[in-house]
Image (cartoon, rainbow, N blue to C red):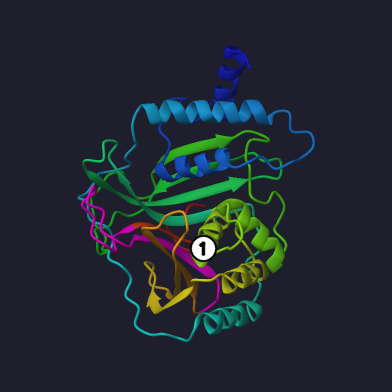
Amino acid sequence: MTDDDLARALRRLDPAETPLDAPLPLDAERRLRQILDRPPVRRRRRPALAWASAAAIALILAIVAGGLWMPGTSASALTPTPLVYTATPGDAAEVIAEAQARLAAGDGGVTAERRSLSLGWYFSASPDGAEATVFRREWVDLRWKEDLSGSVVTTAAEATNADGDTVPNVDPTPGTVVGELRFVRNQFRPLSPAPPDASADAMRALVVSTTGAADTLTAGDAMVGVRSLQGEWTLDDAQQSALLDVLADAPGLRVLGITQDRLGREVVGLAGIPSTTANTDVTLLLSTDTGRIVGFESALIDANTDLDLPAGSLTEYALWDVQDREDAPR
């Protein structure tokens, strides 16, 4: 690839709306890193993939070299208050069976779609690790097509304090597009280019491919895989039920109980510890109304003295099935 080829590739990422030196939103950068680090799926007629990936990597390196981008007004090193679980609805097998029964009895209103819309909150440290920064909530809207082109658009949501209460008069205002990245044809590397089969074997293969699990897929690893798949697809009820089959077979699964998520929806929390991040406890939230997987959270098990964060501090949450909210991107 010549310098001229790379320059043309960079311009094609988004020649109209987004300058080449525009910052990526934090989650978009994270997602793009995951996509580009993933081994390419073997597929015929993919000659354009090499230059597209090289262009995207060059863009990331330029952004990272300039430092972390902080959307909106930063706050103190507080993290959202952990969810409080007040009841135990049964063991893991019972919780999953109940969720699958609700999925089977659902109206089938959700169809598989090459889109992932989430409302999330993300934590990041300053580059030198000396100070922690809390970012506002953001809508992350990934849309992609069968030809593997698409976009990630990040939109500012309402700002909140550590307890989740709205904090008014903070820039940028909710609804402001704070980051946009476009993928050219054949650039995106999804876990599954076609709608995933609604079978436990197919879902397990997808989850394993994103976690790198070897002999045993632990509950924490399975949850990380579910988060990755949900970050690329809107899955229908049958597909989600198959994902729950994978989770049911994973050792280390814990039931946290019933609570309300950060949008006020009643959910059941299931937790596990990923094998690759020993100081992280992750949680999947299942709707008690629909049985669907509607949330993911990540928290510290032990205190992080470098960032001055106590044990239990939340480092990420993402909420799905949020398309019907009035403030959701359209």
**Which residue ends up furthest to the right in the rendered image?**
44
For residue 4, above or below residue 116? above
Identify which residue, 70 or 325, lies in the foreground: 70
Asked where in the image residue 7 lies, by quadrant, the reply is top right
| Viewer can see residue 198 | no
Q: Position of residue 148 (x, y in %)?
A: 67, 41
Q: Which residues are magenta?
A: 289-314
The reply, left or right, for residue 101 in relation to residue 257 is right
**Quarter of the rendering occupied by the N terminus:** top right
Q: Quadrant of residue 312?
A: bottom left
- The structure residue drawn at horizontal position 56% and vertical position 38%, both measured from the top left corner, is 36
Secondary structure beneath dot 1 equals: helix
Q: Pick whichever, 13 or 41, lies toward us.
A: 41
Q: Main secondary structure of the magenta part?
A: loop
Which residue lies at the image location 49% right of the left edge and 27% below the top edge?
59
Left or right of 117 on screen, residue 106 = right
Residue 102 in the image: above or below residue 235 = below
Q: How many marks?
A: 1
Query: Which residue is tagged 1?
Result: 223
Q: Position of residue 262 (x, y in %)?
A: 36, 67
Return the residue nearer the eye: 257 or 18: 257
Place of residue 237 in the rendered image (x, y in percent of width and height, measured from the top left): 64, 70
Q: Is residue 209 magenta?
A: no
Q: Given the current orientation, which residue lies at the most extreme front position?
A: 215
- Vertical placement of residue 204 versus 62, above or below: below
Taking the image as drawn, is residue 263 in sight?
A: yes
- Residue drawn 42% across and 73% down? 265
Residue 231 x/y as whole percent: 54, 53
Magenta stretch: residue 309 in it?
yes
Identified by mark 1, the residue type is Met
Give the answer, above or below, for where 169 lies relative to 251. Answer: above
- At horizontal 52% and vertical 60% (from top left) the residue drawn is 221
